[in-house]
């Protein structure tokens, strides 16, 4: 009886969120947004606009073992879709380093304080450039060895229909990136 009531409540919440225009699948509204050449400006049908400031003039590439992947949706940046944690070296080994991701932040822990982990750990906040790139990102699973390439983003400013600033998105030690290329090099990569 309790299980059926919880199911009804869950379905009601899902229907309510969908009716409010929230995409429960986390799919960016590619067809509803207008992207400038180079993706530095984005416009929505309701008049909101975003200014994207890139961190570097050239693409960055993140290659390594995926320790976390999740999809997310935020109406203030509806073109963002994933958090993916890409690791190398000791950070890629669950026997050496414990990792977790919570609320777009990564945490790690290791036992031997005299021997800190070697390698890299990068949490990517992902803006897929196209529907095709988004579909490729959906195929990534934990323990895949991947290469993700694109332009790193320094800041995303949001403006309302009158051009008034409504806030900004900036990462704090992670890597926000406009992804243009995804390669799964190996699935279920064994780690040392």
Image (spheres, rainbow, N blue to C red):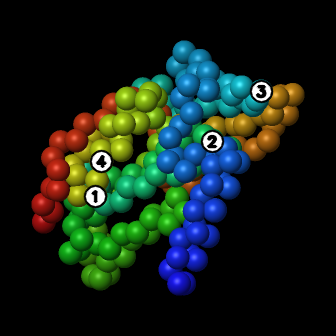
User: To which residue does mark 1 refer?
Assistant: 142
Q: Picture coordinates of residue 34 (x, y %)?
A: 61, 21
* Number of the label disc, if any, that sits on residue 47: 3
User: To which residue does mark 4 refer?
Assistant: 140
Residue located at (18% from left, 42% from top): 185
Nearer to the camera, 90 or 165 = 165
* Mark positioned earlier in the residue sequence (3 or 1): 3
Q: Find the distance from the CA under tag 3 to the CA under tag 1.
A: 38 Å
Q: Are marks 2 and 4 in contact (CB under 8 Å)?
A: no
Q: Find residue 61 and report its image quarter.
A: top left
Q: Are marks 1 and 2 in contact (CB under 8 Å)?
A: no
As helix, strand or loop, the secondary structure at mark 3 comes to loop
Q: Are marks 2 and 3 in contact (CB under 8 Å)?
A: no
In this view of the protein, can residue 48 be seen by the observer? yes
User: To which residue does mark 2 refer?
Assistant: 77
Q: In screen coordinates, is 51 left or right of 115?
A: right
As helix, strand or loop, the secondary structure at mark 2 comes to loop
């Amino acid at each position: 009886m309790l299980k059926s009531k919880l199911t009804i409540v869950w379905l009601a919440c899902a229907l309510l969120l969908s009716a409010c225009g929230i995409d429960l699948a986390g799919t960016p509204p590619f067809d509803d947004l207008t992207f400038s050449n180079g993706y530095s400006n984005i416009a929505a049908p309701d008049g909101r606009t975003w200014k994207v400031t890139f961190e570097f003039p050239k693409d960055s590439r993140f290659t390594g073992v995926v320790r976390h992947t999740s999809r997310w949706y935020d109406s203030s940046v509806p073109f963002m879709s994933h958090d993916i944690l890409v690791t190398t070296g000791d950070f890629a080994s669950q026997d050496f380093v414990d990792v977790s991701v919570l609320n777009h932040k990564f945490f790690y822990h290791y036992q031997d304080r005299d021997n800190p982990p070697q390698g890299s750990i990068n949490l990517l906040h992902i803006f897929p450039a196209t529907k095709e790139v988004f579909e490729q990102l959906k195929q990534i699973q934990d323990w895949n060895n991947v290469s993700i390439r694109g332009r790193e983003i320094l800041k995303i400013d949001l403006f309302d229909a009158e051009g008034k600033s409504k806030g900004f998105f900036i990462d704090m030690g992670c890597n926000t990136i406009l992804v243009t290329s995804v390669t799964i090099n190996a699935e279920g990569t064994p780690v040392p």
